[in-house]
Amino acid sequence: MEKPLTQNIRPDGTPLNLAEYEKAGGYQGLRKALTQLSPGEVTQLVLESNLRGRGGAGFPTGRKWSFVPMGDDVPQPKYLVINADEMEPATFKDRLLMEGDPHQLIEGIIIAAYAVQAGIAYIFLRRAYVTARQRLKQAIEEACAKGYLGRNILGSGFNLELYLHMSAGRYICGEETALLNALEGKRAIPRSKPPFPPVVGLWGKPTAFNNVETICNVPHIIRHGPVWFKDLSRVPDGGTKIYGASGKVRRPGAWELPMGVTIREILEEHAGGMQDGLTLRALLPGGASTDMLTAENLDIPMDFNSMQEAGSRLGTGTIVVIDDRTCIVGLLANLMQFFAQESCGWCTPCREGLAWLTKILNAMEQGRGKPEDIDHLRLHTRLITLGRTFCALAPGAMEPLQSALMYFEDDFKRHIHEKSCPWRDL
Amino acid sequence: MLSEQEKKEIEVVAGHYPIKRAAGIEALKIVQKHRGWISDEVLSHVADALEMSPTDLDAVATFYNFIFRRPVGRHVILVCNSVSCWIMGYDTIVSYLKDRLGIGFGETTGDGRFTLLPNVCLGACDRAPVMMIDDQLYVNLDAEKIDKILGSYD
């Protein structure tokens, strides 16, 4: 099975330098794009590959690029922003790609910037990724020295400046318009949409916006073509995917697998199944803000459409495994505390609603829950929805809660009736 | 006053953006690297350097959790409190740390060695529970490991 994204990642994790990356076929996709293809043709190939955004939303990448206005009368410079914030709890896939093969990301960035004709690109990297920062910095310097960045790249007349921007924290920076505000040196508060970033983005200029894993696919698509890319996948969405698992499985980790493998394959073949004596009770398939699934759902393929049909989302594709000795109510209290704390505070349903829900869940976990609390929780999952909030943070926070109430209502009831957490001493 | 070194570093990073004030967060991080935290006085010097008001810069400084507006110890411990670490024993790890250091979250040890802070997911969930001290990540934590790690800092 081909693993284009991780083929260069060494067992000890040390990255390839520029010469080694080139020897492994690196920067050939860039050469092809800049010397043989027009920007429109690059976008067309990515469109045909059915590459969908790996940040969680799954929007087709080629279509996203096609929204960026082209031509001489468009405001300049245009920007490309790479979301390397990876702050969705339980997600650690972009770390793997940035630490293990930084040149792959840089090559993808240059090709993507060429496709949308962006003159300046920023990698927005989270503060905690210190190793990724060092390796990307080194790789950017190498790429500059070799002429892959800067002016007249490969004699094509295309210019690109690439900067690494280190974030100063906050989950909300993963929301693309909040990230733009953070890059502009402001508080990371989401912007009202429309206008959308491809037209009015960073400093009011057209801005393309992609996740790290998404962009790492681009050099391979250009080099080997969209048909090859689609064939990597078991489903209509093209490519492979970095899946992961954390929680009490035997071998937590991340693996590059064909898009559309089942949850069972990931958890049993790759993560080695549950630790001794534990049973799987539930899982969050793609990070903290995805609906829970249960042991009944293990044969569902992990792709965008199948997960949606199952009532959840692929999200980041990194699974949190919840075993039978972990309290679901306690876990939700942890998640809600996270979302409440990370709310930027701009809109009321998020600022007030999440804090209230956290209080209810904490009280319940500590044995102070009231029978009417379950209705309050459920009511909020119906009130805090997209369209009532400024961005997707608070609606995302409702996903694990609404699914837990659907699958595990008895757990909530037991906390209330027994006036303590039944899982406390397990 | 800002040192020549700080001014130089701020100038370089300000060149990455079309307007100076965009470098605010970066500039605060530069100064924090040299001084450990951002006092009111330093904040207003940085604001001057970026041609913006101290109030505007403070609005930014107080938004981001990695800008410290209060003094911190020589080393800052960030304990991951997100879902995977929580499942893997965050509660035990954090009570051990608090006992061992004799401080709670947001506090600094009497000898000025450590400040203890909770932190959202550090992106090392396959090796949970985890923490960072300054720029160093520590994984698969248990009591014995924590003792050894803390002992290696002065």
Image (tube, grey):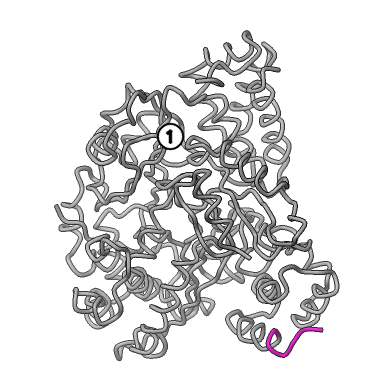
Q: In which quarter of the image is residue B7?
A: bottom right
Q: Is residue A283 visible?
A: yes
On the rendered image, what quadrant is the C terminus of chain B found in?
A: bottom right
Magenta region: which residues? Answer: B1-6
On the rendered image, what quadrant is the N terminus of chain B found in?
A: bottom right
Where in the figure is residue A419, as x and y percent of width and height? 66, 12
Q: Quadrant of residue B45?
A: bottom right
**Is residue A24 placed above or below A257 in the rendered structure?**
below
Which residue appears at 51% of the width and 31% of the height?
A400
- Determine whether the residue tagged by mark 1 lies in a helix, strand or loop: strand
Where in the figure is residue B54, as x and y percent of width and height? 83, 71
Which residue appears at 66% of the width and 89% of the height?
B8
* Side of B102 where A5 appears, left or right: left
Q: Which amino acid does label 1 sit on?
A: Leu
* Side of B110 where A313 appears, left or right: left
Residue nearer the viewer, A241 or A50: A241
Where in the figure is residue A141, as x and y percent of width and height? 42, 84
Name the residue tied to disc 1.
A284
Residue furthest top in the image: A417
Q: Can residue A37 be seen in this view?
A: no
